[in-house]
Image (spheres, helix red, strand yellow):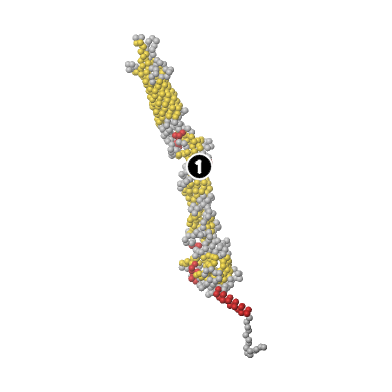
Amino acid sequence: MSHRLGGLCPLPVASPGLLALSGLLALSGLLALLAGPAAAEEYKLVLTPEAGQAPPARVCFVSRNQQMKAGQASGIVAPLKDRLTCTGRACVAHRDTRPVRCKLCPEAAHPSCAAALDLGERVPDDYSVVCADDDTRPPEGGTVYISVESVEAENPPQFYSLEVSGGRVRWSPIEPISRPSYRVLGGDFESSRFSYPRIATDQPWAEVPVLRRCRCLEAQVGRGVGAVGEVLVDGAATCRGETAGSGLLPVELPAVAVDRVVALSVAAERGDSGARWASRWPTVPIEMLPERFEFDWIMPCTWPRAEVCPVATIQGAHCAVGAPVEGTCSYDCRVIADQAVSPPVGLHLHLDDPALDVDGILGAVGQRIVGRVPAAERVVWADVSAWEHRTPGDRIEAIEVVGLDGVRLTVELDAVAGDRITLPLPGARCGASVRAEFIGERDYDAGFGRIAPGARLELPHPDDLGVPWLMVFGLGGGAAMVVAVEEERTTQTSLSYVLTATLGVRLRPRASSFYIEPQLLALIVADWPYTPLTDDGGGDVVQRHLYAAEVIELGLGWTTVLAGRTFHWRGSAGAGIGFDPWFNANEVVEQGRPMGTWSIGMDTPFSSEVDSLLGLRLEVRHWFGSRTLHFTVDDWTTVATQREPANVVMFNALLTLTP
C-alpha cells in the first residue's frame, strides 16, 4: 500500500554508479588545479636561414610578460636582463653556442659578430625569456632571440611549451592569444625591422627568415704555413679553428653589407695571406693570396758553396735569405704591392762565385725543396790555403784534372784570386774519385781527389805527390888554367881546355828551397904540363898531355827566383875528392894521390819549372892536390923526379838533363 504526501513531491534516490562518477570528476578537477594552468592552442613557425645554411642551434622566445611562469615542458624562464650585457641601450647577449669548428676566440669578439639585440625603445627589464635547444644540434650553432607579440598588446603571452627540431618551432601559450606575430630581436642572427607573418594567413606554419651575423667558413691557407697566429677581419681579431693538416682554416666571418669590401688576413708561422670580397659571403673555400711566405731550400751534395745561400728570384716578390743552417737555406719572401703571387710559381736561384743558375718550382708556401744542380752545370772547388804553392822552387802553376767524362781540365793558379779554385766538372757526384796532377816548378806524381759534400774536391797535398829526388846528367866544358909550382917556387901557368861530365842525384825535401846533390864527375884536361924523360937524357922541355880525373862531390844548393815567374836560378856550392883513373899515363902525375875539388855554380832551367828537363849550369871549379911530374938528369947519369903541386881553375858551362 502506498502513501501519498499532499503538496509534496518525493525526492529521487541516487543510484550507486552515479555517485562514483561524480567523485572521479571532482578528483580530476582538483589534480588539474594543483598541476597549473592548461595549455591553449599550439602554434608553429619555421625558421628559414639563407640557402645552404643551418638553422639556429638555440631558440629563445621573449615576451613582455614579466610575471611569466614556467609551463609544462618549457625551458627555464628568466628575466632577459640576466642574459645580456648592456652599455646604455646597446645590449649584447652571452654567446652560449658557438660553431663547432671556430672555438679559438680572442678575448673580445669581433664587433660584427657580437650577439647584439635590438630592443628598440624598451629595456631588458621589460622582458622575460625562455629558451630551447634544437634537438638536431645544427653544426653552425648560434642563438636567435625572437619576440612574440599578439594583437592584444595588453596581454603578452605566457609560454606553456617550446620545442625546436630542425628549425621548426612548436609552442603553446598558457592562455589563448589572437594571431601571434614574431620579430627577430637579434643574438647571433641579424635583427629584423618586420614582424612575421607579414599578412594574415591560414597556413599552419609561419615562416620567419633568420640571417646570420657571422659564419664559420674555410679559408685555403695551405698546408705548409705552420702554426696559425692572429686572424683579422677588417683589422679586428676573430674566432678561428685549426687547419688539422688540411690547409683549410675555419674562420668566423661577418656578413658583408652592400657596397662594402671585407678584408681577411691570416698570420702564420711560415707565411701571411689575405683575401678580399664584396659579396655577402665569400666563395668557399676562400682563396687566400700570399702576402708573405717562407720556404726552405736544401742544398744538394754538389752545391759548390756550402756556406753561401743562392739568391732566390720569384716574379712579383722580394726574397731575403741568411746564412745556411745545417745545409738548409730559409727564404722569407714578401709580395710586392699590387702583385699576385700564388704557388706554384717559378723559382730561380743564382750564385755569383762560381757563376751558377738553377731553375725550379715553388709548389706551396713553407715547402722544403730538395735542391738539384743540373749535371751539365756542376762545378767543384778545392781549398789551396794549406799549400805552400808560392814558395820559390815549389810553386804550383796549374792543376790538371781528368773529369768523369775523360776530359782534361786545367786551372791556372795565377788567374785565381784567393785560396779557392773552382773547376767545372760535368756529372760530378759526391764520393767519386777524380785524377789530378800538379804542374809547377818541381815534378809531381799523379794523385786522386775525392768529391765530398758541398762539391768540395779534396785533393792530396802537393808535398805528398812531389818527387823528392831526380837524376841529373850534365855534359859540357870550358877553359882551364893549370898552375904548377916548380922547385924554385916559380909558377908555371898554362891555359888549357876541360871537358866535364856529371851524373848525380838531386835530393830536395818537400816545401824547401834547399837541396843536396851528390854527383860523380869526370874531368878531362886537354893540356896537362909535365917534363918527360927523353931518349937523349934531356928533361928540361915541358910538354902537354891529356889528363883525366874522377871526382866524387857532394853539393849543397839553393833555389830562388831571379826575375819574374818564368826565370829561376839555382845557386850551389860543392866539395869533393877525386882520383886518377887507371888509363892515365904514369909519367904525367903522381899516381895514387887523392885530389880535392870545390866549386860554386849557378843553374837555370829552360822553362818555368825549376826541375825542367833541360837546363844550363855555369860553374867555377878549383882542382887542387895533384902533383905533376918533371924528370931531370944530373950529370947525364942520375935521373931526378920532381913532384910539383898543380892546381886547376876551371870555368865550365854544362847542359843538364833532368829526366
Relative depth, front residue between 100 and 316: 100
Furthest residue in direction left, as rendered:
488
Q: Does the rendering let one see residue 385? A: yes
The local secondary structure at tag 1 comes to loop
Residue positioned most to the right: 1
Residue 191 visible in rendering: no
Residue 518, by quadrant, is top left
Q: Nearer the viewer, residue 433 or 400?
A: 433
**577 over 20 or under it: above or below:** above
Query: Looking at the picture, how far across and down is residue 425, in whole percent?
Result: 51, 39
Q: Residue at x 50, y 69 (%)?
A: 80
Tell me the crowding category of disc 1: few under 14, some 14 to 19, or many 20 or more residues within 10 angstroms, Cα based.
many
In this view, the residue in front, 258 or 380, is 380
Q: Residue furthest front?
A: 1
Q: Is residue 407 above or below residue 538?
A: below
Which residue reaches farthest bottom?
A: 6
Q: How many marks?
A: 1
The answer to whether residue 423 is left or right of residue 577 is right
Q: Is residue 103 above or below residue 376?
A: below
Residue 1 picture location, percent across and down: 67, 88
What residue sits right under mark 1 in the picture? 302
Q: Position of residue 391 (x, y in %)?
A: 41, 34
Residue 606, image x, y percentages: 44, 29
What's under tag 1, amino acid-wise? Thr
